[in-house]
Image: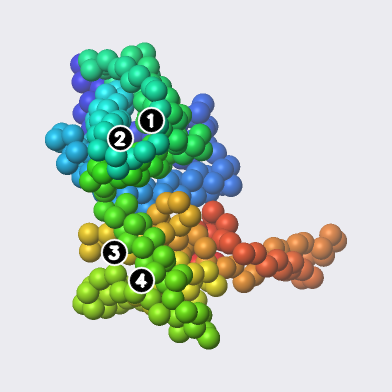
Amino acid sequence: MTTMREAGLSRPEAGLDPRLTANGAPKAPKEVEECHVSQKLAVLQEESLKPIKEDLAEWIARTLGIEITTDNFLEILDNGVHLCNLAKIIQGKAEECVMDGSYTEPLPKVSLKYRNNATSGSWFARDNTANFLKWCKAFGMADDQMFETEYLVSHTGEKSVLMTILELARIGYKFGLDPPNLIRMEKEIEKEEEVVEVKPAKPSGLDAEVIPIATAENIFDLDAEVRRIAFLCKCHDHVKKLGDGKYLIFGKVVQIRFLKNRHLMVRVGGGWDTLENYLIHHRPVEVFEHKRLVPGEPHDVGNKYLYFKSKYKSHAQVASEHNGHVH
């Protein structure tokens, strides 16, 4: 007998319908709103991670000669085998660098063992992943840069997985492995900053000379796209160009690059974020409004308002504005 699920028929189910509790009872309006906010934030995060996942998928496919895309990213990696293969390639590169004298520090003494036939979700998949993370730590990766084993095996922490693989690519680049585009852009920024540092200081920070990193045509396209997104986010007054790929956003100097002429990426700390996501989450909120009812008076009379100034938007505002409603 064909079930409703197999037939593709839709039916509200507890745990799936945001309007219902786990027991199937209707949720209170506030709970429903919180569920919608959580769902919208999840969509925002997925959109901001897609360019990074796309770049890393192409790097892994190129390095290992396997088929991997943004659609099957975690499914391909979740048994830990391909991550261990990447680590093995990087270790081979490191040993070559030691032999030819281009790297003079002693390499970590770590043995990487893993099962090539581990199935997804199995104990062996967890063991492979744990051994990969042990290798990463031996090669200098910090604890806060490594995902938890279960994040990969159970597909519950994609962002952490991506950040770890990005750091793995940085380790590989140190030993001569061809890097993802994001790492190339990082190195361009680092070289640019090194050149700027040795030049004589200019009287004004806004007039400081910046070494071009691309052709005039690409820079023009980048700047036009930055302005377009800033207008869409209604914060163009807070985005100022300082130089080629260098901008002042909400009082902070950031570097912006085009990833494959499709995605505008902002260098944030040790990682990257899409420009749109960065603007949405960092745009200052001038005023929060809170309605306070005065006891003993009608609801439409004597209402008081408390005003708070806040530096960053609340999650609810971010999700609401992304849905087209501005508070």
Mark 2, other Cα within 10 Å: few <14 / some 14–19 / many ≥20? some
- Label 4 or label 2, whichever comes before in sequence order: 2
Please give the residue where the numbered disc 2 appears in the rendered image.
Answer: 98
On screen, residue 91 versus residue 269, left or right, reads left
Mark nearest the camera among 4 and 2 is 2
Q: Earlier in the sequence, mark 3 or mark 1?
A: 1
Q: Nearer the viewer, mark 1 or mark 2?
A: 2
| Quarter of image, res 131 | top left
Q: Which amino acid is tagged 3?
A: Phe
Q: Quadrant of residue 84?
A: top left
Residue 107's mark?
1
Disc 1 and disc 2 in contact, CB within 8 angstroms: yes
First reached walking from the N terminus: tag 1 or tag 2? 2
Name the element at disc 3.
Answer: strand
How far apart, in angstroms, are the residues tagged by discs 1 and 2?
8 Å
Foreground pick, 88 / 239: 88
Q: Which residue is mark 3?
A: 258
